Amino acid sequence: MSSLNRSALARLRGFLQSHIDERRIPGAVAVVALGGHVELFESLGQCDPAGGTPMKSDAIFRIYSMTKPLVSLATLMLAEEGRLQLSDPVSRYLPQFAGQQVAVDEGGTVRLEPVRRESTLQDLLRHTAGLTYEFLGANAVQRQYTEARVGSRSRSNAEFCTALAALPLAHQPGSCWEYSRATDVLGALLEVVTGQPLGALLQQRILGPLGMKDTSFAVPQNGWDRIAEPFATDPDSGEAVRLLNAREAPRFESGGGGLMSTAGDYIRFLQLMRNGGMLEGCRLVSRKTIAWMTSDHLGAIPVHGDLLLPGYGFGLGFAVRTQSGLAPQPGSPGQYFWSGIGGTSFFVDPRDDLFALLLTQAPNQRIYYRNLFRQLVYAALD
């Protein structure tokens, strides 16, 4: 079995601290676990740079798209119970998505054509449903997303779906992978299946059983002093940094990016994944479901955009490494990961029985630190 080099872990800590000292990031919580044992848990820098408060080990971060794996897991739990199937069309549960059309750009004009097949739940989970994100570009569909304010936190999940379904798709379902609002749709779909708000469903089925006591769509008042905050202005652009208001309960419980969480809580989710669906005697899903979830579901489906690294496919809620080479960081086939736009990231490497987690609130620096953190973690493997 592998072990961790203590001097390399100290180098990782020193690297993060030096970048905090240089005011590149306000603070961070870093976790490295090997063989299911947490070997490094460091709280560095400031939790709130405006007030100068030090980072807390139980600081609460806006984890944004690290919400997606939790909602994906809830979907597969319901599939195990026979309450849905991944081959089901989305319109079976959300009829407003029936009869969708696809926007085809023809030299500056947009022509609409009918879908060749309907989107399925599997399409939502693996981001092949033909949807997009408004912040990933400025094509005709993305501009319509922006104009319709599809991500407004003032809408309910059902109202979000009504607004989104009225807009054309960016691609034919199943034709390509594009990161998108698909998991937001999935969150609304789970509300239909269960008759529960998404937050209540996650609490009952995952957060409560796993003891993830600080994970929710808003931070209660008694936790406000633990909310990790970004710099007021970005250190590169000088522009104001705006993140979700963690203190205000939204109507839109975004399955794609709305949760707040702590390192301690997310460790418990990663331990569940590492253990094949069980934690401390509590089994949420079967070992085969976890293996299915963390396998590549793209195959030959092409990737649109540059968010998915070379050497990676996509599973049911995670990017999944398919090759030892190609990617610009080390790793093993079967490794899976995802991250959040606010500056949070994790990865799990089953081959080396390794997982790691980096939480910070530095949106524009996130890719640099996500990649370098992974490099430094693998450098500590003996």
Image: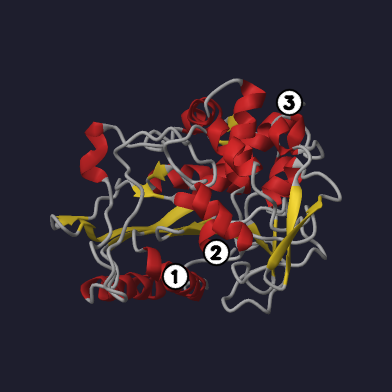
- Measuring 60% from the left and 43% from the top, which residue is drawn there? 164
- Measuring 39% from the left and 33% from the top, which residue is drawn there? 213
Pick whichever of labels 3 and 2 is earlier in the sequence: 3
Report crowding for label 1: few under 14, some 14 to 19, many 20 or more residues within 10 A (C-alpha). Answer: many
Query: Does dot 3 land on a helix, a strand or a loop?
Result: loop
Report crowding for label 2: few under 14, some 14 to 19, many 20 or more residues within 10 A (C-alpha). Answer: few
Q: Circle 3 is placed at which residue position?
A: 81
Circle nearer the viewer, 3 or 2:
2
Three-letter amino acid code at the position of disc 1:
Phe
Q: Nearer the viewer, residue 182 or 32?
A: 182
Single out the residue that lies furthest toward the left. 51
Q: CA distance from mark 1 to mark 2?
A: 24 Å
**In the image, is residue 313 above or below residue 257?**
below
Q: Which mark is residue 62?
A: none
Three-letter amino acid code at the position of disc 2:
Leu
Q: Would residue 257 be found to the left or right of residue 360 on screen?
A: right
Q: Would residue 88 be found to the left or right of residue 17 on screen?
A: right
- Measuring 40% from the left and 61% from the top, which residue is drawn there? 343
Q: Would residue 54 be found to the left or right of residue 336 on screen?
A: left
Single out the residue that lies furthest toward the front. 109
- Measuring 36% from the left and 33% from the top, which residue is drawn there? 249
Q: Which mark is residue 373?
A: 1
Pick whichever of labels 1 and 2 is earlier in the sequence: 2
Q: Is residue 25 visible?
A: yes
Single out the residue that lies furthest toward the top. 195
Circle nearer the viewer, 1 or 2:
2
Q: Circle 2 is placed at which residue position?
A: 136
Query: Does dot 2 land on a helix, a strand or a loop?
Result: helix
